[in-house]
Amino acid sequence: MDDPTDNKKVIFNLMGTLLMLVQDFEFIMRHSVRVTFAHRSDLTADKIFAEDKQTLGTLLKDLAKKASIPEETAKLLARVLADRNVFIHRLRYQKWFDLETTPGRNAVWAFLGQFSNDLTRATAILMAAQHQFAQTVGFESADFVKFRTSKFWREMVEPEKPQASQIRRRSYPSTKHGQG
């Protein structure tokens, strides 16, 4: 019996789905840098809602400055960044990228599968960290409360809570007004 996933159409469908997941991840990363791990003085409407043109690499560096990130999570985020850049900018130019042969399609599937798993896990860790932050400041939107009952939350985010709890906001020196 033929493998139904061994065709270009299915691969292109997965690529479209992954593109949407990349956009979700980048949105969540921006929120993490701007709000979840931001210094109190940066929590202004102007700063939170300002247009952001930072690259994902810059956002990851900013996150590392604002939060203490466990080594395993840092490696995961670095892999996501590297694979995201291949996926978005250079996928067609990889030596192994060949949609015309079964070995080529298998290589594409291997890359897309690993990238999808890493991307989903990184997104879930950041979402769990954001949830923990929302609980500490006493804020959860109705949409977020509803989202916490979803299958994605139960199956993907809940298991990552222990990893997310290891991400700690860095302390900042107190200002001259005594607020840190």
Image (cartoon, rainbow, N blue to C red):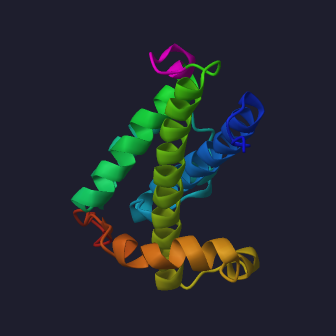
Using the rendered view, name the quadrant where residue 129 is placed. bottom left
Q: Position of residue 107 (x, y in %)?
A: 49, 31
- Taking the spot 56% from the left edge, 50% from the top edge, the residue there is 25
Q: In the rendered view of the protein, which quadrant contains the C terminus?
A: bottom left
Q: Position of residue 165 (x, y in %)?
A: 36, 76
**Is 46 left or right of 74, judged from the image as shown?**
right
* Residue 32 visible in the current orientation: no
Q: In the rendered view of the protein, which quadrant contains the N terminus?
A: top right
Q: Position of residue 156 (x, y in %)?
A: 55, 70
- Taking the spot 47% from the left edge, 46% from the top edge, the residue there is 114
- Taking the spot 32% from the left edge, 67% from the top edge, the residue there is 167
- Boundaries of the magenta span: 90-97
* Residue 67 visible in the current orientation: yes
**On screen, residue 142 above or below 54:** below
Verify whether residue 177 appears in magenta. no
**Is 33 left or right of 153, judged from the image as shown?**
left
Using the rendered view, name the quadrant where residue 10 is placed. top right
